[in-house]
Amino acid sequence: MRLEGRRKSTNIQDMRSRRTSSRTGFGRGQRRVRIPSSGRTIRSSSGGFSTIIIMIVLFFVLRSCGIDPLQILAGGTDGANPFDQMIPQSQPQTSQVPKSAPNDKQAEFTAIVLAETEDVWSGIFQSSGTQYSKPTLVLFSDAVRSACGSATSASGPFYCPADSKIYIDLSFYDQLARRFGASGDFAQAYVLAHEVGHHVQNIIGVLPKFNQMRRRMSAAEANAMSVRVELQADCFAGVWGYYTEQKGLLEEGDIEEALNAATQIGDDTIQKRTQGYIVPESFNHGTAEQRRNWFYRGFQSGKLDDCDTFSGDV
């Protein structure tokens, strides 16, 4: 991307110098797995037999849900959340942190890309007679506390609709290249543009409606609807890419970088990589083909009307 001399966004909170203990785990869709019990504490004179039984049961429960426990134990993030919007918790926790200017290359790049999304979406909203409310980008290291709860770096980038903030540990860019095989500056820009896409969904009412509906949905129904939400965010990222190209900011190979990133973070690609098989009913972001196609659809047309993932097949 040709970003030299471009404006940097000031809507950034740099929390990387702070350390936040994370007490609430964030996984895909914030799901937790609990083993039913009678309410009694199980004790063992050996101190470990009961724990072993519980771990064995948990292993098979996770496998049946399409989650690879071995990958989790290994500390890998291949099955983490690329990329997501988090559900607000009933008791929000917020951190008031003064804004500070980024002083490193990755943070500078991210600030410029965020500014480019601000300009594009402000123009799109203005053309329809409305005003674009800009999100805040929070840079963190290791762990962070948001209005949607606490998260660790392993959660990947996410958008919290409760505080209209995007959260990212910049080390994810390295993981994107190393673990997901998606390198390049426009692949990184696609990550941020996708999260901004969730912010747009929040403004136009897509996220509030989905998060309200999912309370009455089965797990399978929620996953299917989540796929449509995520694919629309991919399409919105493509719309941003369309206008970015119109400005002459894209270089040869940039679009291929984004399409490769969309391919590498498809649900089917990740499951094949982490566990060797796929569980379609557990998909909640979309397949590699779907994510690639919807990003490219938005990029080709630059029209929001072409990002209707809720009508017909996806």
Image (cartoon, rainbow, N blue to C red):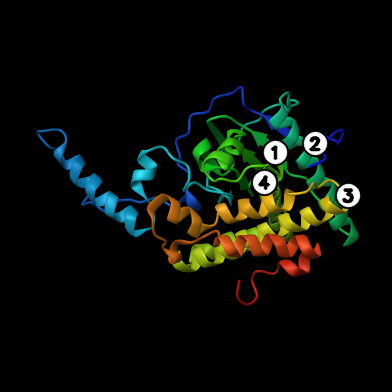
- In this rendering, the answer to whether 250 lies above or below 295 is above
Residue under pointer 3:
247
Tell me which corner region of the image, top left, top right, bottom left or bottom right, holds residue 41.
Answer: top left
Residue under pointer 2:
9
Judge by depth and name the residue closer to the eye, 34 or 77. Answer: 77
Gap between marks 3 and 4 measured at Cα: 18 Å
Q: Is residue 41 visible?
A: no
Quadrant in the picture for the N terminus: top right
- Identify the secondary structure beneath mark 2: loop
Residue under pointer 1:
137
Residue at the location (49% across, 46% down)? 80
Amino acid carrying mark 1 in the image? Leu
Is residue 58 left or right of 253 when viewed as pictured? left
Within-10-Å neighbours for mark 3: few <14, some 14–19, many 20+: few
Tell me which corner region of the image, top left, top right, bottom left or bottom right, holds residue 203.
Answer: bottom right
Mark 4 or mark 1, earlier in chain? 1
Label 2 or label 3, whichever lies nearer to me, is 3
Residue 16 image offset from top left, x and y in percent: 62, 26
Is residue 187 left or right of 54 when viewed as pictured? right
Amino acid carrying mark 3 in the image? Lys
Mark 2 or mark 3, earlier in chain? 2
Mark 4 or mark 2, earlier in chain? 2
Gap between marks 1 and 3 measured at Cα: 23 Å
Gap between marks 2 and 3 measured at Cα: 18 Å
Mark 1 or mark 2, earlier in chain? 2
Residue under pointer 4:
187
Tag 1–tag 2 contact (CB < 8 Å): yes
Residue at the location (41% across, 37% down)? 75
